[in-house]
Image (tube, rainbow, N blue to C red):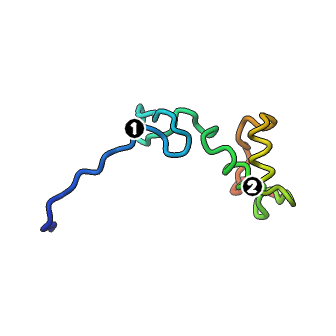
């Protein structure tokens, strides 16, 4: 049992990564931008050694690709489905 008074936790109104609104229509709330919100992180994850193993594709290059508009969507391959 809790002996201290319960403090209500405020839910965020904006995405902490992009500052966009949050889609609250489903059970799990998500940024309205979808995967585009975390695009650099998704690309870096897919390029890592255990997934696509793209040598030399680090944070600097990923950020540059996204900033230039060269890459605008997230990778569709996931490590769990990718087979060499």
Relative image position of residue 75 (x, y in whole percent): 73, 44
Residue 6, position in %: x, y?
18, 57
Q: Is residue 34 above or below residue 54?
A: above
Q: Residue at x 16, y 66 (%)?
A: 2
**Residue corresponding to mark 2:** 59
Name the residue beneath numbered marker 1: 13
Mark 2 vs 1, N-terminal side: 1
Find residue 33 and name its label.
Answer: none
Q: Residue at (21%, 55%) from the top-left corner?
A: 7
Which element type, helix, strand or loop, lies under badge 1?
Answer: loop
Disc 2 crowd rating (10 Å Cα; few below 14, some 14-19, many 20+) is few
Please tell me which residue is depicted at 35% across the width and 44% down the height of the picture: 11
The reply to whether callout 2 and callout 1 are in contact (CB within 8 Å) is: no
Secondary structure found at label 2:
helix
| Quadrant location of the C terminus in the rendered image | bottom right
Q: Viewed as shown, does residue 41 lie left or right of 13?
A: right
Side (left or right) of 37 relative to 8: right
Neighbor class of circle 1 (other Cα within 10 Å; few <14, some 14-19, many 20+) is: few
Total marks drawn? 2
Image coordinates of residue 31 in percent, x first then y, are 51, 38
Rounded to the nearest angstrom, the CA distance separating label 2 from label 1 is 28 Å
Q: Is residue 15 above or below residue 21?
A: below
Residue found at x 54% / y 45%: 17
Q: Position of residue 8 (x, y in %)?
A: 23, 51
Q: Residue furthest right?
A: 55
Query: Toward which corner of the image does residue 45 lie, by quadrant?
Result: bottom right
Against 48, residue 61 (above or below) is above
């Amino acid at each position: 049992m809790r002996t201290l008074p319960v403090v209500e936790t405020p839910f965020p109104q904006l995405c902490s990564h992009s500052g966009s609104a949050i889609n609250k229509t489903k059970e799990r709330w998500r940024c309205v931008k979808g995967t585009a919100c975390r695009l650099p992180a998704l690309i870096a994850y897919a390029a890592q050694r255990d997934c696509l193993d793209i040598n030399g594709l680090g944070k600097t290059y990923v950020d540059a690709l996204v900033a230039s508009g060269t890459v605008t969507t997230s990778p569709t391959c996931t490590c769990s489905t990718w087979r060499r």
